[in-house]
Structure formats: C-alpha cells, structure tokens
Amino acid sequence: MKKGLLIVSVLVLLSSCDLTIIEVPFDNRDNFVGRYEAEEYSETYDQLSFFDMRILRDSDDFSNAIYIRNFYAQGIEVYAEVNGRNITIPRQVVDGFVVEGTGRLENGDVFLTYSVDDTYSNGRTDFCNTVLYRR
C-alpha cells in the first residue's frame, strides 16, 4: 500500500511541473560572418586576384543586412542582404565604385558574382566571380 501511495505521489508531483523550452531564433547572417581569403576572377580582364575580406552583420537584430569589407580589394565596405543561404548585393555607389551582384553559401564558403564600375577611370565594367574561403 505504501509503495502504491509513493508511486501516485511521484506521478502527481511530476504532472504538476511545467517544462518551458526557450528557442533562440537563428540568424542566417551568422553563417556568413567571418574572415575570408578571397580568390577573385575577373571575366573582363581575364585576371585572378587574391586578397582578404571580412563579413560583418548589421547590429540591428531585425535586419537581414551584412557588410562586406575590402570588397574588390579596394578597401570599400559594401552592403548586402541575406535571404537564407543567399545574398543580394543591391546596386550601390561606394567611393566611386558602382557595384551589384549576388552570392550563395556552400559548405562554409561564399560564392559571389558581381559587377563593378570604376567611375574614376571610366573603364569597362568588370564582371567578377569570387570564392571566399573561411580562414
């Protein structure tokens, strides 16, 4: 009888407990944030370049914005928007460079395709494919 009463008491005690699970929302921008070694191929000039880049996220938690530093190896910072594993670099003018493009995340590496117009040199539009390897 005491054994049965003990089991019932334990069951009552356990059924009266509430278990609260708090899920922290995942931010897709965190997949892109970091330091990278860039391997940039210019289709326009048939030239391969190597340099460092860094991706930072916007401080606004409700934003989908990231910033790409040392873009095009020119020391400029470009704004981009994250949508899942894809990014969009909207058309923007930064320090005389007109840039726009897209990108995607694959196995920790970032693949970018973009165009750059240098308004100072009035040269041809440079179409680039770049792979960012995480350091």
Image (tube, rainbow, N blue to C red):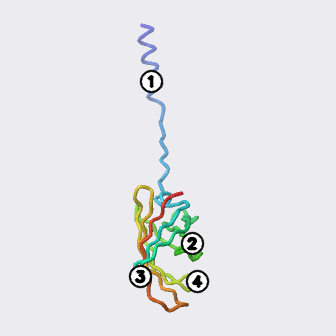
* Alpha carbon distance from label 4 to label 3: 21 Å
Q: Is mark 4 on a helix, strand or loop?
A: loop
Which of the two labelled residues, at mark 2 and mark 4, occupies the earlier sequence position? 2
- The crowding category of the residue bearing disc 2, from other C-alpha atoms within 10 Å (few below 14, some 14 to 19, many at least 20), is some
Which of the two labelled residues, at mark 4 and mark 1, occupies the earlier sequence position? 1
Q: Are marks 2 and 4 in contact (CB under 8 Å)?
A: no
Instruction: Write down the residue under mark 1.
Output: 12
Q: What element carries label 1?
A: helix
Q: Is mark 3 on a helix, strand or loop?
A: loop
Residue 84 visible (yes or no): no
- Left or right: residue 51 versus residue 130 is right
- The crowding category of the residue bearing disc 1, from other C-alpha atoms within 10 Å (few below 14, some 14 to 19, many at least 20), is few
* Alpha carbon distance from label 2 to label 3: 20 Å
Residue 42 visible (yes or no): yes
Q: Residue at x 44, y 13 (%)?
A: 5
- The crowding category of the residue bearing disc 3, from other C-alpha atoms within 10 Å (few below 14, some 14 to 19, many at least 20), is few
**Disc 3 marks which amino acid?**
Thr
Give the label, 4 or 3, closer to the camera: 3
Give the label, 2 or 4, closer to the camera: 2
